[in-house]
Amino acid sequence: MSKKNTKADGLAAEIPRKKAYSMAKLTRVIVKYDAGWGNTLFIRGKGASGLGWEKGIPMQNIGCDEWLWEQFVPKGDVTFKLLINDAQWSKGEDFVVAAGDSIICKPEF
């Protein structure tokens, strides 16, 4: 005797499972700084995938004095510093942005 498939049996298979990354929120760091011709701003820190203190990630230049880093971050804070050409650290305390928020930074070097 074989079991019949009912509509109720198929419903469980059709419900999509939530994945951790689908609950992540877009987190943005916008930097207002003229790094000079041929220079690039980098970001280093913790709290987001791929972000570390040992090696920076180049930021996207979106204007003559505007830079962007954005990533989906599931929860918590992203703590970071900015660098010119991944060599010269910004002065002062670390910057912090919460997952899903945006921050506009005006660093000093």
Image (spheres, rainbow, N blue to C red):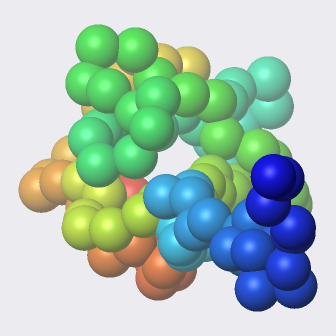
Q: Kindly indicate the quadrant of the structure image that contains residue 12.
A: bottom right
Q: Which x, y percent locates residue 56?
A: 46, 23
85 relative to 15, above or below: above
Q: Kindly indicate the quadrant of the structure image that contains residue 9.
A: bottom right
29 relative to 104, above or below: above
Q: Which x, y percent locates residue 97?
A: 33, 71
Q: Residue at x 32, y 27 (%)?
A: 52
Q: Residue furthest left?
A: 93
Q: Residue at x 40, y 46 (%)?
A: 48
Along the viewing direction, whichever of 71 and 55 lies nearer the viewer: 71
Q: Kindly indicate the quadrant of the structure image that contains residue 3.
A: bottom right
Q: Is residue 29 visible?
A: no
Q: Residue at x 80, y 31 (%)?
A: 37
Q: Which x, y percent locates residue 47?
A: 29, 49
* 93 with respect to 33 (left or right): left
Along the viewing direction, whichever of 10 and 36 lies nearer the viewer: 10
The C terminus lies in quadrant = top left
* 91 with respect to 13 (left or right): left
* 82 with respect to 33 (left or right): left
